[in-house]
Image (tube, rainbow, N blue to C red):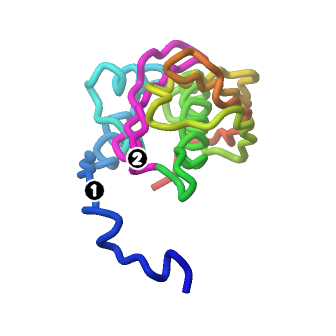
């Protein structure tokens, strides 16, 4: 019998929980009609439009928006830990994908959208709750009418680079979508 066979759930203490709330994403999408990508991102940043559910779920906030560049921040908690006791790489990857995509979005005209094609993430140091607030900067490397390329840099609360990424987005018209 192993040590884990002998342990019961009681040995782990009381379960922890958190409540996640979000706004109807279809209402935000409908309100974006007629806005350029930069106008849309600024409307979310200043609270005129609700943030997307993924931002609510993972605790991301927009800190800065300008054409071709966005900055998000978020402070991970234990609810996003993996089994070895560090923040799951999926949170860091999602943060990188989000800032790359949103940076691309700031370069798009009204009626034009994007979706991620791929992402390559380099994890450079572990992230834990003691890492503090993560700050992710997404920058467009190459805008495009069909494919746009961006990069992300994510630093911890001490300004240390914890991950970098590059990604491509497919750019398409919303006409006839929905």
Quadrant containing the N terminus is bottom right
Which type of secondary structure does the marked residue at label 1 adopt?
loop
Judged left or right of residue 48, residue 70 is right
Q: Is residue 58 magenta?
A: yes
Q: Does the magenta stretch include residue 125?
A: no
What is the CA distance from the residue labelled 1 to the residue labelled 2?
A: 9 Å
| Residue on which disc 1 sits | 16
The image quarter in which residue 84 lies: bottom right
Q: Quadrant of the C terminus?
A: bottom left
Examine the rendering and report whether any part of residue 172 can be seen. yes
Residues packed near mark 1 inside 10 Å, few (<14), some (14 to 19) or many (20 plus): few
104 or 171: nearer the viewer? 104
Q: Residue at x 67, y 31 (%)?
A: 163
x and y percentages locating residue 90 in the rendered image:
58, 49
Mark sitting earlier along the chain (1/2): 1
Q: Residue at x 54, y 24 (%)?
A: 156
| Rendered view: 141 above or below 167 | above
69 to the left or right of 146:
left
- Label 2, residues with CA under 10 Å away: few <14, some 14-19, many ≥20: few
Q: Name the residue: 62% across, 19% down.
A: 160
Element type at marker 2? helix
Residue identified by numbered label 2: 78
Picture residue at 58% right of the left edge, 21% below the top: 137
Q: What stretch is highlighted in magenta?
A: 56-80
Mark 1 vs 2: CB contact within 8 A: yes
What is the x, y in percent for residue 62? 41, 24
User: Residue 46 location in percent, x, y?
Assistant: 30, 19
Q: Position of residue 140 (x, y in %)?
A: 68, 22
């Amino acid at each position: 019998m192993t040590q884990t066979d002998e342990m019961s759930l009681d040995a782990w203490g009381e379960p922890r929980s958190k409540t996640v709330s979000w706004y109807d994403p279809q209402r935000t999408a409908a309100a974006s009609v007629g806005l350029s990508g930069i106008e849309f991102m600024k409307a979310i940043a200043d609270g005129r439009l609700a943030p997307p559910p993924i931002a609510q779920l993972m605790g991301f906030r927009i800190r800065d928006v300008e054409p071709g560049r966005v900055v998000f921040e978020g402070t991970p908690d234990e609810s996003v830990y993996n089994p070895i006791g560090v923040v799951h790489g999926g949170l860091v990857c999602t943060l990188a994908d989000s800032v790359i995509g949103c940076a691309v979005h700031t370069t798009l005209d009204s009626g034009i959208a994007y979706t991620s094609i791929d992402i390559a993430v380099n994890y450079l140091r572990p992230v834990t709750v003691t890492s503090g607030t993560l700050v992710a900067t997404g920058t467009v490397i190459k805008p495009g009418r069909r494919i746009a390329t961006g990069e992300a840099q994510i630093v911890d609360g001490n300004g240390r680079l914890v991950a970098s990424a590059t990604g491509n987005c497919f750019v398409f018209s919303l006409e006839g979508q929905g």
